[in-house]
Amino acid sequence: MKLISWNVNGIRAIAKKDFFDQIKKMNPDVLCLQETKAQDDQVKEALKDLNNYFIYSNSALKKGYSGTAILSKKQPLNLIYGIGIEEHDQEGRVITAEFDDFYLTVVYVPNSGSELKRLDYRQIWDAEFLKFLKKLEEKKPVLFCGDLNVAHKPIDLANPKANYNKYAGFMQEEIDGMDNFIKADFIDTYRYFNPQKEKAYTWWSFRGGARERNVGWRIDYFLVSKSIIDKIKNAEIHDNEYGSDHCPVSIEINTSL
């Protein structure tokens, strides 16, 4: 079973590119999207030509902002929108699908911002989101994926020294938040299979030919409960797929939906 996660940087924009051909080629059983930048009806309209998937989306109150979606070939047992805290649930950042053997949560973690104005909020978010995941985990294993807006280790970005504790995405507070997921027995699947692989990035600035030069950051992840790691076959970064400033990431799992 193949799961793909992709920050599409606007579902209506990417749908006008090669998106449908890309999804047909990659053929995921479940497709997890972040930053749809559309309301629920607009998401469904943009994806109307994508057959064979049940489509669920969680949109922000603010139009054209944030937003997540899950597309699944099999209908989930249940859907959970948000994390149950109104302060955090107004931006459409989390959607969870329950399947027979696990929960699958899609997340678009808040960016601390160019002037770090949301760094304090980001720390609150990380803590509350982790509590939500651990509550789910009491019932069955959890897989969560998406744009976590943090490069975890120096190996995960092209210029760690220049960015450390200066720019959003590589602040110590954000790294600590990621550390807390790992300490809570969630496993970064890509690093599990590729512990030393360098220059493996999932996001590139639009500026200065960053993608062509591969000056990027790995900020898109699949993390899974430790109890289910033996079911994960592989984890990949699809950096040859264009259409967004992010590329898709995927895992394959030996279990049924």
Image (cartoon, rainbow, N blue to C red):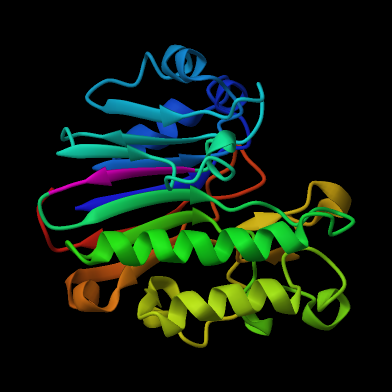
161 or 130: nearer the eye? 130
Q: Is residue 116 magenta?
A: no
80 or 241: nearer the eye? 80
Question: On screen, 69 above or below 116?
Answer: above
Residue 240: image x %, image y %? Answer: 54, 51
Residue 196: image x %, image y %? Answer: 52, 88
Question: Is residue 28 at all visible to an observer of this figure?
Answer: no
**Residue at the image position 53 percent from the left and 23 percent from the top:** 15
Residue 66: image x %, image y %? Answer: 61, 36
Residue farthest toward the bottom in the current orientation of the protein: 196
**Residue at the image position 27 percent from the left and 20 percent from the top:** 51
Question: On screen, 125 above or below 42?
Answer: below
**Residue at the image position 88 percent from the left and 77 percent from the top:** 162
Question: Is residue 29 at all visible to an observer of this figure?
Answer: yes
Residue 59: image x %, image y %? Answer: 52, 28
Left or right, 31 with respect to 211, comes to left
Q: Quadrant of residue 57?
A: top left
**Residue at the image position 72 percent from the left and 65 percent from the top:** 169
65 or 245: nearer the eye? 65
Q: Main secondary structure of the magenta part?
A: strand
Left or right, 22 with respect to 197, comes to left
Q: Range of the magenta residues? A: 94-99
Question: On screen, 114 above or below 123?
Answer: above
Labels in figure, total: 0
Left or right, 236 with respect to 174, comes to left
